[in-house]
């Protein structure tokens, strides 16, 4: 936002200077008119008049690069009992060995809890190892040991309270939560949905999963848009999911428009015509329809695009010109001398901001 304030201040100053001068800018603006003694000698400026003949060169929407998915995928899921889990054990035809004990007790209330040593106590057998084993492995152990007392025991073992393994979900979700794993695999999307879903400010393309001391990126947006399964991985015990807040990627609309403002480009592509429409359009009594300009940093310097909307057909061209983050759209009535002053003031700001943004993006990625 510091960049937006700087641009607003520059444009406001130039607008005030130009109020008393009746002359208007000559169009199209030529490159040599953009240069004056105030411009830095090493600053390259390119003026481009948008026409039906060249608009296709600039019609490609900006790419929204994301870090992609680095979290290793898992093809299977087997739940293994752990400390704190509660087991319900049924021995057919032997109610004295079946939990829960008592008429009014549910399996959760009367089940056998796995203790901190990973074992539980069972009649006739004593302590039974449970941690790290599947319910079927525990059942087989009970069958083997009870066979000394009961001929061909028929036993069922199931987990009725899952309390040993969990994942945490934080960040831009409905409500941060801790979710226990069960015999059903838990995917990233399931975990987020169980936490109230993504908030309106969430960035699903840059989800972070911390696992066993490592930090991984997950592009959930890729799964939501294209069904790429790598973007919806299976979670395991101890995973911490963090959904970041979406970073605004703004273009700035200034000058002789009804509602000077910013346009967020981080979610959807927005064309020049769409942007002008969203801020109320041009101020008809003051704006020069020939003077719709877009300032854009590029690898070769600063590009200044001009769209002459004196004809309604020009707005059709504007629908084929997508804006990019940090574009500055300016509608002017300034004369040539004040136009050059505007350029002189804007270019250092644009260049400095471009360097800062590039460094910031590199740091985020």
Image (cartoon, rainbow, N blue to C red):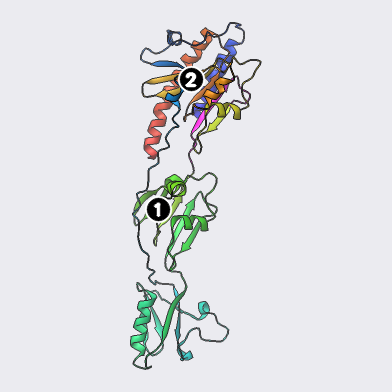
Vertical arrangement, residue 320 with respect to residue 96, above or below: above
Residue at the extreme right of the image, as rendered: 285
Q: CA distance from mark 1 to mark 2?
A: 42 Å
Q: Earlier in the sequence, mark 1 or mark 2?
A: 2
Q: Which residue is mark 2?
A: 52
Looking at the image, which residue is at 47% across and 28% down?
326
Point out which mark residue 229 bears.
1
Quadrant in the rendering for residue 235: bottom left
Depth check, front residue: 171 or 145: 145
Q: SS at mark 2?
A: loop
Point out which mark residue 363 bears.
none
Q: Position of residue 161 (x, y in %)?
A: 48, 72
Depth check, front residue: 14 or 138: 138
Q: Is residue 238 covered in magenta?
A: no
Q: Which residues are magenta?
A: 246-260
Q: Position of residue 120 (x, y in %)?
A: 40, 80
Question: Is 344 displayed left or right of 67 in the figure?
Answer: right
Q: Main secondary structure of the magenta part?
A: loop
Q: Residues within 10 Å of mark 2 (few under 14, many from 20)?
A: few
Q: Residues within 10 Å of mark 1 (few under 14, many from 20)?
A: some
Looking at the image, which residue is at 50% across and 83% down?
100
Q: Position of residue 33 (x, y in %)?
A: 46, 8
Q: Is residue 257 covered in magenta?
A: yes
Quadrant in the rendering for residue 133: bottom left
Vertical arrangement, residue 122 with respect to residue 270, above or below: below
């Amino acid at each position: 936002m510091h960049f937006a304030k700087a641009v607003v201040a520059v444009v406001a100053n130039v607008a005030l200077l130009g109020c008393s001068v009746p002359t208007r800018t000559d169009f199209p603006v030529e490159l040599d008119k953009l240069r004056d003694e105030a411009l830095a000698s090493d600053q390259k400026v390119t003026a481009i008049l948008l026409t039906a003949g060249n608009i296709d060169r600039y019609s490609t929407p900006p790419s929204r690069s994301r870090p992609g998915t680095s979290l290793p995928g898992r093809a299977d899921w087997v739940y293994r009992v752990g400390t704190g889990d509660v087991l319900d054990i049924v021995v057919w035809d032997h109610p004295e060995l079946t939990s829960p004990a008592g008429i009014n007790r549910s399996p959760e209330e009367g089940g056998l809890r796995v203790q901190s040593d990973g074992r539980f106590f069972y009649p006739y057998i004593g302590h039974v190892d449970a941690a790290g084993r599947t319910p079927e492995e525990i059942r087989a152990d009970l069958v083997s040991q009870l066979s000394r007392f009961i001929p061909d025991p028929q036993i069922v073992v199931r987990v009725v309270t899952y309390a040993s393994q969990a994942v945490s979900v934080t960040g831009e979700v409905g409500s941060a939560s801790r979710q226990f794993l069960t015999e059903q695999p838990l995917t990233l999307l399931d975990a987020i949905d169980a936490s109230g879903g993504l908030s309106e400010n969430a960035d699903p393309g840059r989800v972070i999963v911390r696992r066993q001391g490592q930090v991984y990126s997950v592009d959930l947006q890729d799964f939501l848009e294209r069904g790429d399964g790598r973007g919806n991985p299976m979670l395991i015990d101890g995973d911490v999911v963090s959904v970041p807040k979406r970073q605004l990627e703004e273009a700035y609309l200034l000058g002789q428009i009804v509602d000077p403002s910013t346009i967020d480009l981080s979610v959807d592509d927005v064309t020049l015509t769409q942007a002008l429409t969203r801020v109320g359009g041009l101020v008809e009594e003051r704006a020069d329809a020939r003077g719709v300009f877009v300032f854009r940093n590029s690898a070769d310097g600063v590009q200044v695009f001009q769209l002459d909307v004196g004809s309604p057909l020009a707005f059709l061209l504007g629908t084929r010109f997508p804006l990019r983050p940090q574009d500055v759209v300016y509608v002017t009535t300034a004369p040539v001398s004040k136009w050059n002053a505007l350029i002189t003031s804007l270019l250092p700001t644009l260049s400095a901001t471009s360097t800062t943004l590039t460094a910031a993006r590199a740091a985020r990625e």
